[in-house]
Image (spheres, grey):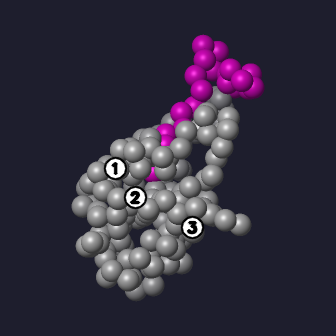
Amino acid sequence: MIINKILIGIDDSKEADHAAEYGFDIARKFNAAVGIVNIVEPALMPQSPLGADPLTGMTMQGTGIDEMELMEIQKSFGDNVVDGAIKKFAGDMPVTHFTEYGPTADGIISCSKEFGADLIVIGTHNRTGLDRLLMGSVAEHVVRHSAIPVLVVPFSS
């Protein structure tokens, strides 16, 4: 088995932090290059004929934030998450940083192809029941659709 490039998918969770630690440790053992990705899933502002949020009834006008600004805020937050993981785990290792927009699982798979990764490392949120049904499982989707091996790192508190 040859592992030259490892892609680590992260978000701002303790589970992703734990997976990043594993990913960087494996990279050191194999002397592999590391790519790290944080996916920005666009959070669209609710639209209604009257400009009010259909759930709360509150108007979205007057917040002063449009969708482009919201995406930029999300990207900036994601960059901070990535920078934090690099500072915490990379040491003197060079790291390639990816920011992808769209569904998380598809973004991780896309970045793995772009990076030429031999392994994807991701954490799992251990969702079960209704939460998993509604939220889906990013890890499960990546495992089922990736053309390369995926290491899913569980988190135990």
Q: Is residue 71 visible?
A: no
Q: Main secondary structure of the magenta part?
A: loop
Mark 2–mark 1 contact, CB under 8 Å? yes
The secondary structure type at the circle numbered 1 is: loop
Does the magenta run of residues contain 55? yes
User: Mark 1 is on which residue type?
Assistant: Ser
Residue 116's mark?
none
Q: Which residues are magenta?
A: 39-59
**Which residue carries the number 2 mark?**
150
**Which residue carries the number 3 mark?**
17
Marks 3, 2: nearer the viewer: 2
**What residue is at 35 percent from the left and 59 percent from the top?**
149
Q: Position of residue 18 (x, y in %)?
A: 57, 69
- What is the quadrant of residue 32 in the picture? bottom left
Q: In this picture, is 87 found above or below 39?
A: below
The secondary structure type at the circle numbered 3 is: helix
In this picture, residue 114 sits left or right of residue 86: left
User: Mark 2 is on which residue type?
Assistant: Val
Mark 1–mark 3 contact, CB under 8 Å? no
Give the alpha-carbon distance from disc 3 to disc 2, as whole Å: 16 Å
Give the alpha-carbon distance from disc 1 to disc 3, as whole Å: 21 Å
Q: In this picture, is 23 found above or below 30?
A: above
